[in-house]
Image (cartoon, rainbow, N blue to C red):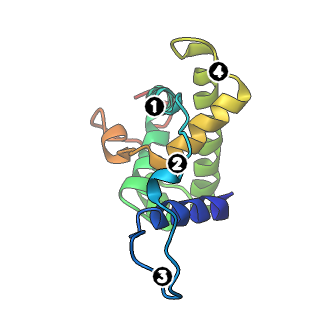
């Protein structure tokens, strides 16, 4: 799928090359106004807005210690060993916890999109499009989303942010 997207992007870029001049072999290209550009998904903006809202809601619902794990790993780009040292865990525990958090976050985002999103409920295909569009072009500022909300220690664990 990624290869096809790359090919599509190359094709779109080639549409903007000069058509009045011959190519390297002396052929003149077809006129650009005769080409038909693919129509985008009219729901794309809605899906990306819903994804942002779902991600924010999912992050708001996680424990303080899990927020700190995500912040250290994704924002500060700390290694598993560094995170383990800061949180008093073994690095394999940090890795397992990050994987657990990712699974929970994905499930929470999907749950939000299925049941809590404003407007008509989204089906599985629409939810898949939300994730796909988010991966392609939703700017996500994890530094802002994961900034510490309260002072104190994250060693205590089960506190909600």
Q: Nearer the viewer, residue 19 or 89?
A: 19
Secondary element at tag 2: loop
In the foreground, 98 or 115? 115
Given residues 144 and 40, the one toward you in this image is: 40
Outermost residue, top side:
119
CB atoms of marks 3 and 1 within 8 Å: no
User: How far apart are labels 2 and 3 at the CA level?
Assistant: 22 Å
**CA distance separating discs 4 and 3:** 47 Å
Cβ–Cβ under 8 Å for marks 4 and 1 = no
Nearer to us: label 4 or label 2: 2
Q: Which residue is mark 3?
A: 23
Q: CA distance from mark 4 to mark 2?
A: 28 Å
Please tell me whether mark 1 or mark 2 is closer to you in this view: 2
SS of the residue under disc 4: loop
- Mark closer to the chain start, 4 or 3: 3
Q: CA distance from mark 1 to mark 2?
A: 19 Å
- Label 3: how many residues lie within 10 Å, few (<14), some (14-19) or many (20+)? few
Q: Is residue 16 left or right of residue 7?
A: left
- In the picture, residue 103 is in which quadrant? top right
Of callouts 3 and 1, which one flags the residue occurring earlier in the amino acid sequence? 3
Residue 27 against residue 55 in the figure, above or below: below
Among the two numbered marks 4 and 2 on one chain, the one whose residue lies closer to the N terminus:
2
Q: Is residue 56 above or below residue 91?
A: above
- Tell which circle, 2 or 3, labels the residue nearer the N-terminal end: 3
Secondary structure under the numbered disc 3 in the rendered image? loop
What is the C-alpha distance between the residues marked 4 and 1? 14 Å
Q: Quadrant of the C terminus?
A: top left
Which residue does the numbered mark 2 point to in the structure image? 37
- Please report the residue visible at 58 percent of the width from the left and 30 percent of the height from the top: 109
């Amino acid at each position: 799928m990624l290869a096809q997207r790359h090919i599509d992007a190359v094709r779109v870029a080639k549409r903007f090359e000069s058509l009045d001049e011959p190519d390297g072999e002396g052929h003149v290209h077809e006129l650009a106004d005769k080409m038909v550009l693919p129509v985008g998904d009219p729901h794309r903006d809605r899906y990306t807005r819903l994804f942002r809202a779902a991600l924010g809601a999912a992050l708001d619902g996680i424990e303080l210690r899990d927020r700190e794990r995500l912040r250290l790993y994704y924002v500060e780009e700390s290694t598993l060993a560094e995170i383990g040292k800061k949180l008093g865990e073994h690095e394999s525990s940090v890795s397992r916890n990050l994987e657990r958090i990712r699974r929970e976050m994905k499930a929470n985002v999907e749950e939000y999109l299925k049941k809590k999103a404003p407007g008509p409920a989204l089906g599985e295909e629409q939810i898949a499009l939300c994730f796909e569009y988010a991966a392609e072009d939703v700017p996500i500022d994890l530094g802002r989303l994961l900034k510490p909300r309260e002072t104190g220690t994250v060693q205590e664990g089960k506190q909600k942010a």
